[in-house]
Image (cartoon, rainbow, N blue to C red):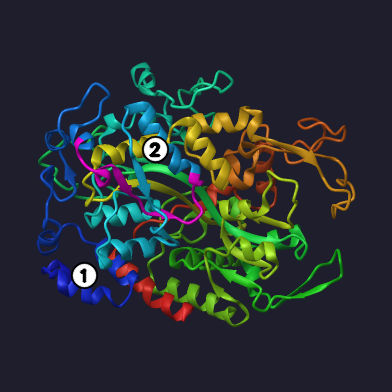
Amino acid sequence: MASALLNGMSRRRFVKYAAIGGLAAWGAASALVYPSGWNKWLTYGQKPWERAAGVVDYDLVAEYEGPMDQYGVPSIYRQGGSERRTLNVAQWYDYWPGKTITDFTLYMRDRFQLDGVQVRWTANIYTSNEELFTWVTQTGRKFDVMVPTNYTVETMEKAGLVVNLNRDWLPNYACIFGPVPTPGELDLINPWISDASEPTYPTFSNGYNTEAGTGFDFRTPSENPYEYRMNRAAYPNPRGSEYFTWDEQNSLIAVPYQWGTTGIGFRTDVFRRADIEDMGWEVFELTSYRNPDTGRTYDLTNRKMMLDDMREVFTAGHKTIGWRQQVARGIPPTAITYNSAAPYNGEFQWSSNEIEDAKLVEASDWLLGWQESSWGFNTPQQGPWLISGERFVDQAWSGDIMYAVRPNSSQFIPVDYFVPKQGGARWIDNLVIHRECEKLWLAHQFMNYIHDPVVQTDISTWNLYATPNAWSFQILHKNPVYSYEGRYPNNYPDPAKAGQPYYWNPAEDYRIYSDFAASHLILDPGPDGQPGTGDDVVRSSDIAEQYTDLGRPPILERSEYQHDVGVKNTLRYFKYWRTVKF
């Protein structure tokens, strides 16, 4: 397939091949480094503001969209009809409250005096990156803004499906975790919703907007290769290099939206926490489980489930087999110096990005070894089916299970989440602009609005995923509006907690923010009933030490980013995935 494309494949033949399945299309496009045959397709219908496929010259955009008026709105948006002021956005399911979208209309009216702006998105909800990629490569669907995961941004960039962004139109990008911007950049951040009770832009003595400093940087190009076209480690030949210097100003292609981890969701009334955390991914091998506290035995047949996501499923397989092989060699995980280099990644055991057939075979064999007792693969129901008790354990994304746990309520549903000792995935979903977008200024305004500090705070409050916005993180932590206080019910399973005060703050929850959770993380109130005091206060540094004591690296050290592995390797994954899934 790769050689055929490199020799120049027609669009018709590509689409015919892609009909085998979305993953085949995904793989085919991902390895293309702009061969001539592919470029003929990419340059078909090239926009007047493009210097090359996906290379936008924003001086030409200004010529096309017309001069800006006193409010900073290009004339084309004043003169055009309602369609000109409507954005077509593709988004994950359950990822923002409807208020976020309706408020964008108000934002554009208040900030720019532009009426009638709307976002069309409810018909564009997808459940996997593969589904989104299939839409834009096979079905002809066109979007203005999309929200792919970091490794999918790499794929889409290589396939010429996204454009470079105008950093000047994204002043709120400076709010994302990273170095404290210059005073001039800070002056450009002008929150739409402001309140004197809200904290201001966070600055720390380390020069970053987080206490974690360099350890948590979502903006520096060398730390985030998926986010910048200039990064040659991800994109060996930046498209259109003869037109621009691909620096931080010109090369931005993605803006972080939300982030999280991939781990295990489980019923706390079925599993004893210590048992399931000790097993990690190996819990899926069980056909039954006896809870030593209750003496009850549970049949796990059809009560286990994995995500319907190829890369996530194989990540679980790679981590499990890699952990076993390392332990079999007599090398405890804590004795290894951390090394992020593939293919043998120290405390990561095996990588999420393994491409060797032998390792894919071993991961497949492990998955097939217990599939008969598993329900199968499903993504949208990872939380709801745990709540209903239809499933006892599943592979899951952090926010989906936290939404099921509902820690900001008094429901106390017996569901919880953790990242297995063997390791899992960490990921960042990102806002990008589709190459077919013809409303570039408006698309940028939407992306900038999403990172208004309070707007981003409200999004994270609703979906319980982690915000990449440092200002929003401070609001979540310091504004009591976003905390929850109540009492454990009198019939709570743990008698010691029954009737006692309950306190929860999203920024302090390690299940959402892992070891990045606010430094005075509180899991339970102290013995005097007051949050933040007593022996039950657990700090994030203590949690890191606890993992070390158990032979488990800190969460984010054992949660690896997935990367685009190219056409041949993606098709190799696809071959084994079909065997496992079908």
Which amino acid does the dot numbered 2 rest on? Thr
Instruction: Give the residue displayed 46% in from the left and 66% down from the top.
Output: 309
Q: Is residue 297 left or right of residue 64?
A: right
Q: Is residue 33 left or right of residue 325?
A: left
Residue 512 shown in magenta: no
- Secondary structure beneath dot 2 equals helix
Residue 555: x %, y % from top left:
58, 48
Please give the label number shown on residue 105. 2
Which amino acid does the dot numbered 1 rest on? Ala
Q: Is residue 277 left or right of residue 568?
A: right
Residue 80 shown in magenta: yes
- The quadrant of the rendering that contains the N terminus is bottom left
User: In front: 331, or 411?
Assistant: 411
Please give the label number shown on residue 2. 1
Residue 493: x %, y % from top left:
85, 55
137 up-or-down from 373: above or below = above
Quarter of the figure with residue 507: top right
Instruction: Give the residue displayed 43% in from the left and 30% down from the top.
Output: 175
149 up-or-down from 304: above or below = above
Q: Start and end of the magenta stretch?
A: 79-98
User: How many C-alpha atoms fall within 10 Å of the one at disc 2: few (<14), some, or many (≥20)?
Assistant: some
